[in-house]
Image (tube, grey):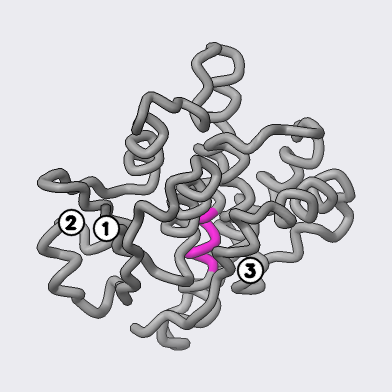
Amino acid sequence: MKLLYQTHSPYARKVLVAAHELGIADRLEVVHHETSPTRRNAEVFTLNPLGKVPVLIDGGRVLFDSNVICEYLDELDGQHMLIPSTPAQRYRALRLQALAQGMADAGIAVRWEAERRPEALRWPAMHEGQLQKVVAACDYLEAELAENLSADIGTIALATTLSWIEFRAIYAFQAGRPRLAAWYADFCTRASMRTTALHGDTRD
C-alpha cells in the first residue's frame, strides 16, 4: 500500500498513527507530498479531486479522507481494533473523532487568519470565532475526557489534532486544564506518536 502523506498535516498523521497502532505501518510506503489551496499538486489531484492528502492506494483502490482511510485500515485482516463494535464505545470514539476533526478544521482557519492570509485581507472576527471553537472544545474535553482511554480512532484523532495545535502554536490548550494535559502527555509517550512527529512548513 502507498500512503500519500504530508509531514505537517494532522489528518495525515492520524492515519499513520493508526497504522502503527494496528501493527501494519511496515506495509505502507509513505510518500510526502506538499499540498496547499494556493498551489496545485498535480499528482495528488489525479487521485483526489479535492487535491488533499492523505490518500491511500491499495492495488487498484484509491481512498481519500483520513476517516475513510482509517476505517479501511481497521478492517484489514478483520482486525477492527480502532473502531469499537459495542455501540456505547463505538459512538464515544466516533464522537471524539468528530470533535478532534472540528478542532483541526478550526485551528487551520485560525492559522489562515493569523499568518497565512495576506495581512491586509485578514479578518480578526473570523480568527477569534474559530479560536473560540478550539477553546470550547478544550474546556469540554477537560470536563468530559475519561482517564485510561485505550487507543482507538477517537483518542488517536484527538492526540494528533492536539499535537498539531501545539506544533503550530495555535492555542495553549494545556494551561489550566490538568486532566487534558496529563492525558495528552501520556498518549504522546506511545511509540506510534514518538515515531510520527510533525515537522516541516506549509508552502503556499
Looking at the magenta stretch, what is its main secondary structure?
A: helix
Could you tell me residue 5's position as x and y percent? 36, 65
Amino acid type at image mark 2: Asn
Number of the front mark, 2 or 1: 1
* Res. 53 in view: no
Q: Nearer the viewer, residue 106 or 179?
A: 179
Could you tell me residue 56's position as x and y percent? 27, 52
Apparent side of residue 79 relative to residue 138 in the rendered image (left or right): left
Mark 1 is surrounded, within 10 Å at the Cα level, by few (under 14), some (14 to 19) or many (20 or more) other residues, namely some
| Label disc, if present, on residue 170 of the rendered structure | 3
Q: For the image shown, how many numbered marks are present on the structure?
A: 3
Quick check: is 72 in the magenta stretch?
no
Residue at (21% x, 58% y) in the render: 50
Which residue of the protein is positioned furthest toward the top in this rendering?
Answer: 87
Could you tell me how far apart the alpha carbons at marks 2 and 3 are, in whole angstroms? 28 Å
Amino acid type at image mark 1: Lys
Q: Nearer the viewer, residue 59 or 50?
A: 59
Q: Earlier in the sequence, mark 2 or mark 3?
A: 2
Report which residue position mark 2 lands on. Answer: 48
Q: Residue 143 falls in which quadrant of the image?
A: top right
Report which residue position mark 1 lands on. Answer: 2
Q: Which residues are magenta?
A: 104-110
